[in-house]
Amino acid sequence: MIKVLYDNRQDVLEITAHMEEAIKKALEAVLNREGLEGDFEVSVSFVTNEEIKELNREYRNVDSETDVLSFPMNEEFEGVNILGDIVISTQKIIEQAEEFDHSREREMIYLTVHSMLHLLGYDHMVEDEKSLMRAKEKEIMKELNIFK
């Protein structure tokens, strides 16, 4: 089971109950694909490009906007594995959905799956790791029936 804590700090994109449920379902799909069982918690924050740029500069020393940031914790508290925080730029959801000609929901779910894999220790800094991570993303998106 996963508990998702939502923090909406933007007003660019309306975050609906349907979107929150789709995110939770995507997070559960990642856990299932990885064969993980137990109680988990993840925080998902929705922010502007301006805020994500500040976070990117502060935590990664990269002075530019990005679509999503992952802050792994992997701490256990009272039997719950707190995986960490996912921070998504809603402006990037809109921009990238248009750029790649797919729905905003598809972009939001892709960023969620991508970031959740980061929380679980996957990375894409070297080619082998990137190939593995991309393959997992594709499998999970296919499992969720999200293509466009």
Image: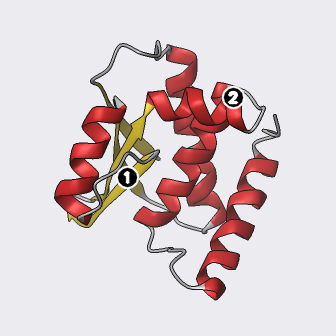
What residue sits 62% from the left and 59% below the top?
32
Q: Secondary structure at mark 1?
A: strand
**Quadrant in which residue 71 is drawn:** bottom left
Instruction: Indicate the amino acid at tag 1.
Output: Leu
Residue 80 in the image: x percent, y percent? 29, 56
Q: Residue at x 21, y 60 (%)?
A: 59
Query: Circle 1 is placed at which residue position?
Result: 69
Q: In front here: 35 or 105?
A: 105
Residue 118 position (above or below residue 130): above
- Residue 120: x percent and y percent? 45, 68
Q: Residue at x 56, y 85 (%)?
A: 126
Q: Amino acid at mark 2?
A: Glu
Say left or right for 143 vs 32: right
Locate residue 142 relative to residue 7 in the image: left or right: right
* Image quadrant assignment for residue 146: top right
Q: Which residue is mark 2?
A: 98
